[in-house]
Image (cartoon, helix red, strand yellow):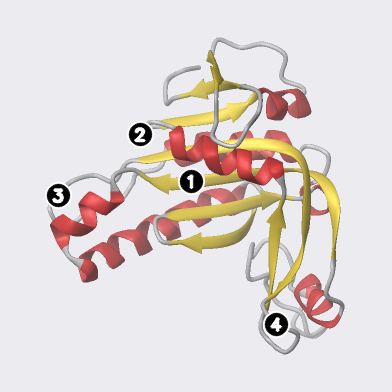
Amino acid sequence: MALMKKGPNSRNPHFCNACDAFIRAHPGGAEVEMSMLFVDARDSTTLAERIGPTEFSKTMSSFHRAAIDAINESDGFILGLVGDEVVAGFPPGFCGKDHAGKAIRAAKDLLRLRLPKAADSSTLQIGVGVHSGAAYIGTAIGSPSGPQDVNALGDSVNTAARLSTVARAGEALISEATFTAAGVVGDNLESRSLDLKGKTSPVEIRVWRVGAE
């Protein structure tokens, strides 16, 4: 790959960086059916207050590295690291038709992680949200001459983010839309109907916890 002037993709090293160069040269995007995953730390504000900014930064860095590795193994692409949160997309152009199944697998793997301990010996806890649907994925430009980045936008992205927000520690809230897209008809997972902020109708989800299946 080096002889072809290609290297690892910055969002998932299992893929090459050819698309990175393409989007820099040709800004834009498209609306596609894809899966989104958000994972964030629970009670991170309280943790930051207890251990101070430097130790909190070390704990978050360890969490980010572990989460990124788990997501990359399921062919997910890291779209953002925002404080105590990791955002990933599973675009079918890279992940294939089973993008929803891979997002579910990533969510389960995240909950199986041996999470880092903070400086006060407390163990970090996380919650995960996964949803599938139409999203616009493409280049986001702050200004015509400014930096370019890839982002995903749309109601399905917002839904995944809200699911991760309301997930309890040690839970992955995975929408029925994702299970339908993955072809999963039935299992022994707990089902819930959630009223999420900004949604006009409830979102049907299933809850996965370690040991649930």
Is 163 on the left or on the right of 118, as rendered? right
Q: CA distance from mark 2 to mark 1?
A: 11 Å
Marks 2/3: CA–CA distance: 17 Å
Q: Disc 4, disc 2: CB below 8 Å?
A: no
Quarter of the figure with the N terminus: bottom right
- Label of residue 121 in the image: 3
Task: Give the distance between the C-alpha atoms of the residues marked 3 and 4, in whole angstroms.
Answer: 44 Å
Q: Give left or right: position of 166 versus 96.
A: left
The reply to whether dot 1 and dot 3 touch (C-beta < 8 Å) is no
Marks 3 & 4, CB-CB < 8 Å contact: no
> What residue is drawn where x is 76% and y is 43%?
34
Which of label 4 and label 2 is nearer to you?
4
SS assignment at label 1: strand
From mark 1 to mark 3, how far is it between C-alphas? 22 Å
**Compared to 186, does 39 lie above or below?**
below
Mark 1: amino acid: Val
Looking at the rendered structure, the kind of residue marked 2 is: Ala
Name which of mark 4 and mark 2 comes first in the sequence.
4
Would you place residue 14 above or below residue 67 in this image? below
Q: Earlier in the sequence, mark 2 or mark 3?
A: 3
**Residue 143: numbered disc:** 4
Q: Residues under labels 4 and 2: Cα distance? A: 38 Å
Is residue 56 in view?
Answer: yes
Residue bearing mark 2: 169
Residue at the disc numbered 1: 39
Q: Earlier in the sequence, mark 3 or mark 4?
A: 3
Q: Are marks 1 and 4 in contact (CB under 8 Å)?
A: no
Mark 1 or 3, nearer chain start: 1
Using the rendered view, name the quadrant where residue 61 is placed: bottom left
- Given residues 3 and 96, the one toward you in this image is 96
